Image: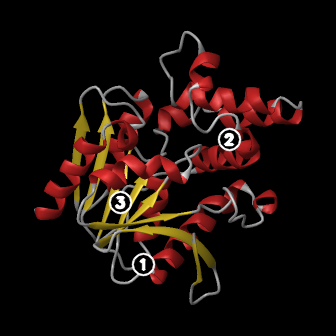
């Protein structure tokens, strides 16, 4: 892990792989940095930059004192500090909440392009009834942290249901360590529930918005909504790929990224 400090005194930590064009990889809600290993392996010619998100792992930006209103702003400022810390104008590649962060960060810093896989944005009709943050918070308050995280996994990773969640979790590399992130995930989800997608996003660089047919319907719709709100956007949907697309189908993703960069 390479620690450094930005011009505005924000301390950032990241790992760097390769010497090519900086590709800054921003993970989603429950995913560790290791989520990006398949993407790094498939992305020849890029210098992958994998940061430690605030509130996750060792880089804790006082997460217990950070409100839902501040979570997105905190992460945007952190990404902008990361951009300042690497040489050249990087490409931002975000997954889920990392994709939302990448888009918001690109509006206020110098990057070459943005790649966003199913940004964590709720369509208006879905957001009206969204209560995942409240349900998780209630379980955490009752001391049921594992159950709280399970509700998140069920809704985001297995929206169509799963026959044996415990068996699936037993094979999931980050379980049960991710249970320690329960409060941070509550704040993150509340921040998503509060976010309102503007009619036009202030991003003046080329953007590639990606989605998969096997992910949650609301995230597939939000990906298209984000695409429509961007002035320079290309939209690609992968058949048979879920919300975990970057780790699930890294070769497909890498090929689309290369095609996007060559246009």
In this picture the colour scheme is secondary structure
Residue 200's label in the rendered image is 3
Q: Indicate the secondary structure of the residue bearing disc 1.
A: loop
Q: Which residue is mark 2?
A: 178
Q: Is the N terminus in the top left, top right, bottom left or bottom right quadrant? A: bottom right
Instruction: Give the residue at the far top of this rendering.
Output: 163
Q: Residue 238: x percent and y percent?
A: 25, 35
Q: Indicate the secondary structure of the residue bearing disc 2.
A: helix
Mark 1 and mark 3: Cα distance apart in space: 17 Å
Front in this rendered view, residue 73 or 81: 81
Q: Is residue 204 toward the left or the right of residue 132 in the image?
A: left
Q: Is the C terminus in the top left, top right, bottom left or bottom right quadrant? A: bottom left
Q: Which residue is mark 1?
A: 109
Q: Is residue 234 visible in the rendered structure shown here?
A: no
Crowding around mark 1 (Cα neighbors within 10 Å: few <14, some 14 to 19, many 20+) is some
Upstream in the sequence, badge 1 or badge 3? 1
Q: Is residue 262 toward the left or the right of residue 113 in the image?
A: left
Front in this rendered view, residue 115 or 232: 115
As drawn, 220 above or below 30: above
Q: Indicate the secondary structure of the residue bearing disc 3.
A: loop
- Quarter of the view holding residue 88: bottom left
Instruction: Give the residue at the far left of this rendering.
Output: 263
As drawn, 152 above or below 40: above
Crowding around mark 3 (Cα neighbors within 10 Å: few <14, some 14 to 19, many 20+) is few
Instruction: State the residue at coordinates (78%, 65%).
Output: 62
Instruction: State the residue at coordinates (64%, 63%).
Output: 54
């Amino acid at each position: 892990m390479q620690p450094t400090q930005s011009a505005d005194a924000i301390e950032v930590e990241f790992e760097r792989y390769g010497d090519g064009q900086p590709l800054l990889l921003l993970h989603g809600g429950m995913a560790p940095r290791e989520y990006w290993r398949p993407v790094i392996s498939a992305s020849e010619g890029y210098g992958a930059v994998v940061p430690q998100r605030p509130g996750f792992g060792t880089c804790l930006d006082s997460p217990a004192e950070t409100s839902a209103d501040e979570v997105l702003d905190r992460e945007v400022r952190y990404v902008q500090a990361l951009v300042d810390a690497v040489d050249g104008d990087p490409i931002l590649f975000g997954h889920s909440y990392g994709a939302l962060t990448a888009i918001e960060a690109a509006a206020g810093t110098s990057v070459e392009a943005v790649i966003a896989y199913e940004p964590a944005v709720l369509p208006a009709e879905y957001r009206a009834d969204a209560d995942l943050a409240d349900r998780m918070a209630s379980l955490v308050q009752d001391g049921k942290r594992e159950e709280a995280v399970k509700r998140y996994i069920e809704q985001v990773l297995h929206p169509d249901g799963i026959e044996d969640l415990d068996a699936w979790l037993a094979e999931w590399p980050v379980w049960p360590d991710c249970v320690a992130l329960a409060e941070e995930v509550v704040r993150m989800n509340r921040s998503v529930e509060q976010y309102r997608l503007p009619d036009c996003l202030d991003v003046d660089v080329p953007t590639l918005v990606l989605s998969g047919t096997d992910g949650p319907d609301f995230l597939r719709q939000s990906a298209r909504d984000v695409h429509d709100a961007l002035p320079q956007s290309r939209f690609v949907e992968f058949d048979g790929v879920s919300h975990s697309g970057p780790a699930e189908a890294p070769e497909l993703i890498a090929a689309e990224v290369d095609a996007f960069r060559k246009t």
